[in-house]
Amino acid sequence: MDFFDFHHHKKNISFGIYNLDQEAIPEDFPYSIGIHPKDIDVDNIENQFHWLESNITENCFAIGECGLDSLVETDQKVQEKVFLRQIKIANDLKKPVIIHCVRKFYEIISFKKFAEQPMIIHGFNKKQNIAEDLLKNNFYLSFGKAVLYNLSLQNTLKITPLDRFFLETDNEDFNIEELYQKVSEIKEISLEHLNKQILENLETIKNG
């Protein structure tokens, strides 16, 4: 059985969504493309958007990762403008948005009103109340390696509906099958059921 990796940085994984590095050239398998908050170059932003828009091929699954990050040096207002512009690109192209967020979840929620396509928080590992607020606002959550050992996050996963989440390796070095196995135990469903549900969720966000 193959297991879909919703967000990864490894070129040797073709069954998943590869996060394209800044200024890189698209691969011949599904990828996402975006301007990460840490990569924003204020003096070169139009060239960055030119790279983004000119490298959207038929294999582009999503726009991102993009979003807001309180730990990077780029001014918050600049981050917000770059994020909003990418949301509008996603709207025009009818592509979902993969979001990077660090300590800015309620600001991210405030941007939901601009989005016409599904929005997915990647690498979610925060408290249950934040997850609940995101879910209430129709975000999807993508969980990673932390689920294997973080009991609080496992409890958050328990309350997350089956049709609202994905699983990913991000840039961690581990086999995603371990994650699927753990989540099937947490959700008390078979591995086959979980795998089928994740693929159905993918179709849902792909079709807006």
Image (cartoon, rainbow, N blue to C red):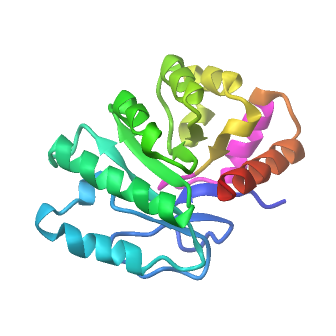
Taking 146 as reference, is 155 left or right?
Answer: right
Residue 9 in sight in this render? no
How far across and how far down the image is residue 100, in percent? 41, 46
Taking 202 as reference, is 148 left or right?
Answer: left
How far across and how far down the image is residue 174, in percent? 59, 53
Magenta stretch: residue 75 in it? Answer: no
Q: Work out whether residue 18 or residue 50 is closer to the camera in this orientation and state it.
A: 50
Quarter in which the N terminus is drawn: bottom right
- Farthest residue toward the top? 129
Q: Is residue 129 above or below residue 170?
A: above
Extent of the magenta region: 169-185
Residue displayed at 16% across by 49% down:
74
Residue displayed at 61% across by 55% down:
6
Taking 113 as reference, is 178 left or right?
Answer: right
How many marks do you count on the picture? 0
Residue displayed at 31% across by 76% down:
50
Q: Work out whether residue 42 or residue 156 is closer to the camera in this orientation and state it.
A: 42
How far across and how far down the image is residue 164, in percent? 67, 37
